[in-house]
């Protein structure tokens, strides 16, 4: 049944909650602790029925996923007593595993589904105020991961898959007037290459109706249109003939998509004509889908490096950056969709979990022995400060370190607005040097400027600490969109080396306790192989984030990269 959806009422509800953020937080914590107080985990910490924030933080320790993993494993193995939650957990989410190296199990339940829908609706309500959409469709590059049963018979899949499978998802999309162009068989197909092709085809079939082009993370949109550049002639032929390409071999997908096709030479000519008039695919999305109001997806954090390409494909279409969350739970909503993605912040929804924040000094060179500061509550954070987020949710995570760093940029009423900074764990470190994902991103951006003068771009990048040499050194892997001469790449390599400004790195480079940075260029298509590798492991394309650092323990990935290196350069910057 289609539910009623009143954007103004959703905004009003959000405003009320954000005005009373502190009170809402106390109520949420009370509810979580009342519902789950009898669980084995909470019993262990002796709360004795207390539900106030002070008792909670005094009794229950801060934990990482590693601490909770044994409890979650017992749930996955089928133990039915209340382990983490009062009500039994019936579904497990797999985090994408691309940020941490390997997928983690996290509990998923109806409350997480509810909060996902709440975020979708709140964010849509604010977006729709700026860019009202008409009744139409969304070209959504969404994919389900493999689903399986755990040893104990619980359904397991990535969080996005659990969401797409839930009937509430479709209802909400319909209520927001943006049902997906593609039939379910495409979203849930077993082969993402075929699903991607069919998403593009369905988008073309419904091209006049498409109001929004979206994906969970912007990477999937880029990936889709890069693929479009390769297969567009085949897509146009399918539309002309009204028959589906032989590359689609999954019977359920063939059947579902064939039903939508009929020979349409006029449409084929029109699409062909539009594409022929494009210069280097500039404005492709706007041209193909003329009634699109905006492009939507997460464009912040590790997605920022794709913005340039996204803007290129988008033409004049606005980019609306999506909300902030994780498999463990949602955090905040983008209530200012007109802001360019680089400036987007997320207003925390105070009723979807209980949030704490550990202050983190901006200065990454602070001494290691410093005692970690105490976490503060949602309404106690200070503007301009950086924090690590601690999450307590309705699905059995208590004082859970999410591992993300955020900066408080302001307040929306009394709830903070957070800017995503990066994952907290250091990416690159050999001795006293400390470089984060953000530092790598900035270095790559600086060096990429030298390439853009040559009209070339970095398709994707990652890094590695090579300690097989003495001294150890940083390795940056680049896939580039074309041929570049050695001189320029040498310059890029020096620029990368110079762009890591961390004092520990600079001083170590000067005295050669860290060796010269190495830039390795990989063959075209290497990062597609990496995506395929993760998908093979059960990750969903929808949640894919290119790992920005590959550790020694990720041998397969290092192997893929090493096998595809075509050139390598050492910096002479120091
Ligand atoms: P997953 O492991 O797939 O659940 O991904 C969750 C992680 O993706 C978060 O912990 C963040 O590091 C990142 N993430 C999610 N939403 C955003 C966002 N809006 N901006 C930047 N990073 C995000």
Image (tube, rainbow, N blue to C red):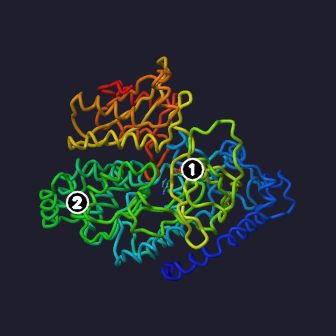
User: Circle 2: is it few (<14), some (14-19), or many (20+) Cα within 10 Å?
Assistant: some
Mark 1 vs ligand 1: CB below 8 Å: yes
Looking at the image, residue 172 lies above or below residue 532: below
In this image, 177 relative to 231: left or right? right
- Secondary element under disc 2, as helix, strand or loop, is loop
Camera-side residue of 457 and 165: 457
Write the residue at 51% across / 44% down: 99
In this image, 506 relative to 291: left or right? right
Looking at the image, residue 33 lies above or below residue 533: below
Mark 2 vs ligand 1: CB below 8 Å: no
Label 2 near label 1: C-beta < 8 Å? no
Q: Which mark is residue 177?
A: none
- Secondary element under disc 1, as helix, strand or loop, is strand
Q: Position of residue 515 (x, y in %)?
A: 44, 22
Alpha carbon of mark 1 to alpha carbon of mark 2: how far?
A: 34 Å
Q: Can you tell which quarter of the image residue 131 is in? A: bottom left
Quarter the C terminus occupies: top left
Camera-side residue of 196 and 371: 371
User: Circle 1: is it few (<14), some (14-19), or many (20+) Cα within 10 Å?
Assistant: some
Q: Position of residue 238 (x, y in %)?
A: 21, 57
Write the residue at 37% across / 40% down: 444
Residue at image mark 2: 283
Residue at image mark 1: 404
In this image, 512 relative to 446: left or right? right
Looking at the image, residue 392 lies above or below residue 75: below
């Amino acid at each position: 049944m289609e539910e009623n959806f009143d954007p103004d009422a959703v905004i009003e509800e959000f405003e009320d909650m954000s005005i009373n953020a502190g009170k809402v937080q106390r109520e949420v914590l009370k509810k979580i602790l009342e519902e789950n107080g009898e669980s084995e985990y909470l019993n262990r910490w002796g709360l004795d029925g207390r539900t106030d924030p002070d008792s909670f933080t005094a009794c229950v320790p801060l934990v990482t996923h590693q601490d909770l993993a044994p409890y979650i494993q017992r749930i996955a193995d089928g133990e039915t007593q209340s382990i983490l939650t009062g009500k039994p957990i019936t579904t497990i989410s797999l985090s994408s595993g691309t940020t941490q190296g390997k997928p983690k199990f996290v509990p998923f339940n109806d409350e997480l589904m509810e909060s996902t829908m709440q975020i979708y609706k709140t964010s849509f309500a604010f977006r729709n105020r700026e860019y009202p959409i008409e009744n139409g469709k969304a070209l959504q590059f969404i994919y389900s991961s493999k689903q399986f049963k755990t040893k104990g018979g619980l359904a397991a899949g990535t969080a996005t898959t659990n969401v797409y499978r839930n009937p509430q998802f479709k209802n909400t999309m319909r209520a927001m007037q943006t049902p997906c162009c593609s039939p379910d068989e495409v979203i849930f197909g077993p082969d993402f290459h075929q699903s991607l092709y069919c998403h593009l085809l369905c988008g073309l079939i419904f091209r006049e109706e498409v109001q929004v082009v979206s994906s969970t993370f912007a990477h999937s949109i880029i990936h889709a249109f890069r693929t479009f550049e390769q297969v567009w002639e085949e897509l146009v032929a399918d539309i002309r003939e009204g028959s589906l390409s032989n590359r689609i071999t999954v019977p359920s997908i063939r059947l579902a998509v064939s039903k939508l096709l009929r020979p349409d030479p006029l449409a084929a000519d029109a699409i062909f004509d539009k594409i022929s008039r494009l210069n280097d695919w500039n404005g492709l999305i706007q041209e193909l889908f003329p009634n699109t109001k905006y492009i939507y997806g997460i464009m912040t954090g590790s997605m920022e490096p794709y913005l340039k390409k996204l803007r290129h494909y988008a033409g004049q279409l606005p980019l609306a950056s999506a909300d902030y969350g994780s498999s463990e739970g949602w955090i905040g909503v983008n209530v200012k969709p007109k802001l360019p993605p680089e400036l987007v912040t997320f207003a925390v929804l105070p009723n979807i979990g209980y949030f704490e924040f550990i202050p983190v000094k901006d200065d990454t060179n602070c001494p290691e022995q410093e005692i970690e500061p105490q976490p503060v509550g949602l309404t106690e954070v200070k503007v301009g400060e950086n924090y690590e987020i601690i999450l307590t949710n309705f699905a059995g995570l208590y004082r859970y370190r999410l591992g993300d760093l955020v900066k408080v940029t302001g307040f929306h009423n009394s709830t903070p607005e957070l800017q995503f900074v990066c994952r907290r764990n250091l990416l690159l470190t050999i001795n006293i040097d400390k470089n984060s994902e953000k530092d790598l991103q900035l270095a790559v951006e600086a060096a990429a400027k030298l390439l853009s003068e040559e009209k070339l771009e970095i398709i994707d990048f990652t890094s590695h600490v090579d300690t097989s040499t003495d001294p150890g050194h940083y390795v940056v892997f680049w896939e580039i969109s074309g041929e570049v001469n050695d001189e320029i790449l040498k310059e890029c390599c020096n620029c990368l080396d110079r762009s890591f400004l961390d004092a520990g790195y600079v001083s170590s480079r000067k005295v050669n306790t860290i060796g010269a940075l190495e830039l390795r260029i990989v063959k075209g298509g290497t990062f597609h192989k990496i995506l395929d590798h993760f998908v093979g492991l059960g990750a969903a394309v929808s949640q894919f984030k290119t790992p920005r650092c590959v550790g020694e323990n990720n041998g397969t990935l290092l192997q893929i990269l090493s096998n595809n290196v075509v050139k390598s350069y050492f910096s002479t910057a120091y």
